[in-house]
Amino acid sequence: MSRPEIEVRGLHKSFGDNEVLRGIDLEIGQGEVVCVIGPSGSGKSTLLRCVNLLEEPTKGQVFVGGTEVTDPDVDIDAVRRRIGMVFQQFNLFPHLNVTENLTLPQRRVLGRDKETAARVAAENLARVGLSEKADAYPSSLSGGQQQRVAIARALAMGPEVMLFDEPTSALDPELVGDVLAVMRRLAREGMTMMVVTHEMTFAREVADRVVFMDGGVIVEDGSPDRVIGDPQHERTRHFLSRLLDPAMAEVEEETSDQVGKSEP
Amino acid sequence: MTDTDTALQPKRKGLTRRQKRGLSRGVQYAVFAAAVIAFAVTADWGRLQNQFAQADIAKQMFPDVITLALKNTVLYTLSGFVVGLVLGMVIALMRLSSVGPYRWLAGVYIEIFRGLPALLIFIFVGVAVPLAFPGTEIPGGTYGKVALALGLVSAAYMAETIRAGIQAVPKGQMEAARSLGFSPAKAMVSIIIPQAFRIILPPLTNELVLLFKDSSLVLFLGVTLEERELSKFGRDLASTTANSTPILVAGLCYLLVTIPLSFVVRRMESKAQEAIR
Ligand SMILES: Nc1ncnc2c1ncn2[C@@H]1O[C@H](COP(=O)(O)OP(=O)(O)OP(=O)(O)O)[C@@H](O)[C@H]1O
Ligand SMILES: [Mg+2]
């Protein structure tokens, strides 16, 4: 196997006294889809944000496509062009229409000319099934449509890797499917993807690997069948049972709090 | 606290709440009307008209009051606004900078210039600057001086407004831009500042109205006949004609601009309110 597309070595991250990541090692191969699951506050978003250096790691190294992201001398803007990121809150640019949301970054960051940028934008809007919304403003779109535009915006930059941070968590349930369908298709096309999600069906069907995080460490890492279907660790089992049967949560709230929370 | 409230309370003698409210409103109107009538009756309208509304004097002001005085007022205001905006933007960005000394310098500027009367700043520009830099001329003559003075006056206020606008843009916007590969400066220019300006357009327009009025302070710089603006023009004519009609006309010229501007601001504010909903 060639070099992993994403490689995380001994990653630590603290916010003040709060150590959120306590030594993460993770490799994601080219074209691999890895879903990251875990309880709230376990550091999933922080891990994802360390991969494109939206958060500065306290210790450890991150490589993307063989380039060390954590090298102090690295051109971080150049690295980020190769890493697409999709946020829970979409973060479309509200003062620009859909097409401009896709063309402005291409023109300002990649220096593409107007025609090329427009062509690439149209291609990627078609890819997420939103060609007819090209002239709409984000505020007039549904959450699901906004998220698909956000995915298209990231794709228009031609990334080698895509990071998704709970892309469907802010959506009404009936809109989740459209976004997942786009991501499924992206996975089939061979995109390297790291997805923080609570969508277990998606993880089971699409992911090559599932990583379970708790308390700032990776507790379990393996195929979906193993991690979701036959978890080896008590913490994983506990988390999954609460996810599948939220009613259980209330009964066990107290114990899980003691396990999960170590901060004052 | 209206009808349902009253309905719940045990029946009392006398007025209901609604009747009381009606009565109090009636008293307010009556007092207001009485004040207006008292003013109208006691004022000496004949003398007022004589002093402030002489048609032939008013006529003789035209077209200069528009082509010269109003034009200069607008020119001074706009040039001051542009200088203030540029300076204010620089100071706002310094205030938000991660570099300590920049933040500190910007803070000092804002505190000093926000606390000084505009008049003092005009005198400062007119007197202190030529003294401090002998031999150098502020480019643009009087226009340059006014632009500088009004710019200094407004920059502190605008810096605070712009900073607030930038901070009102959700953090996710900067993160999205950075994750697409924008440098911090590029993200600021193409993503954050355009959104900030939409937020602060109403307060900026208000500042324009304030500057419009402050431009009258130019008379403390000493201006030539051609450089007079509305206030100076009106005053000069008032003293040569020994009549105050020019003051009234000049005042109306100010309102001609400020009232529509205020109207535009209110429109923008209600639009912004709608957009939030
Ligand atoms: N910018 C920050 N400053 C301080 N603390 C932070 C910051 N970002 C995250 N944290 C803390 O780090 C911990 C982990 O946060 P993180 O967002 O990574 O968790 P998560 O696994 O993504 O949780 P969730 O499922 O709720 O999104 C939390 O305790 C949070 O309070
Ligand atoms: Mg998170």
Image: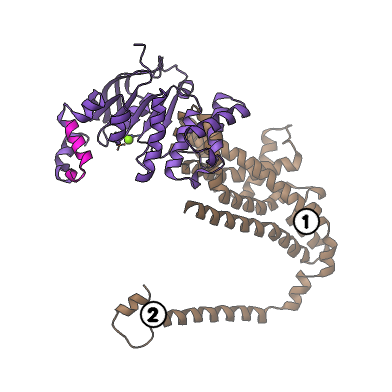
Chain colours: A purple, B brown
Q: Position of residue B134 (x, y in %)?
A: 71, 32
Q: Chain of mark 1?
A: B
Q: What amino acid is labelled 1 in the image?
A: Phe
Q: Position of residue B83 (x, y in %)?
A: 65, 40
| Disc 2 target residue | B17
Q: Quadrant of the N terminus of chain B?
A: bottom left
Q: What amino acid is labelled 2 in the image?
A: Arg
Q: Chain of mark 2?
A: B
Residue A150 visible? The answer is yes
Residue B124 visible? The answer is no
Q: Are marks 1 and 2 on the same chain?
A: yes
| Disc 1 target residue | B233
Main SS of the magenta segment?
helix
Left of B126 or right of it: where is A132? left
Q: Position of residue B196 (x, y in %)?
A: 53, 42
Give A159 or B30, whichever is nearer the viewer: A159
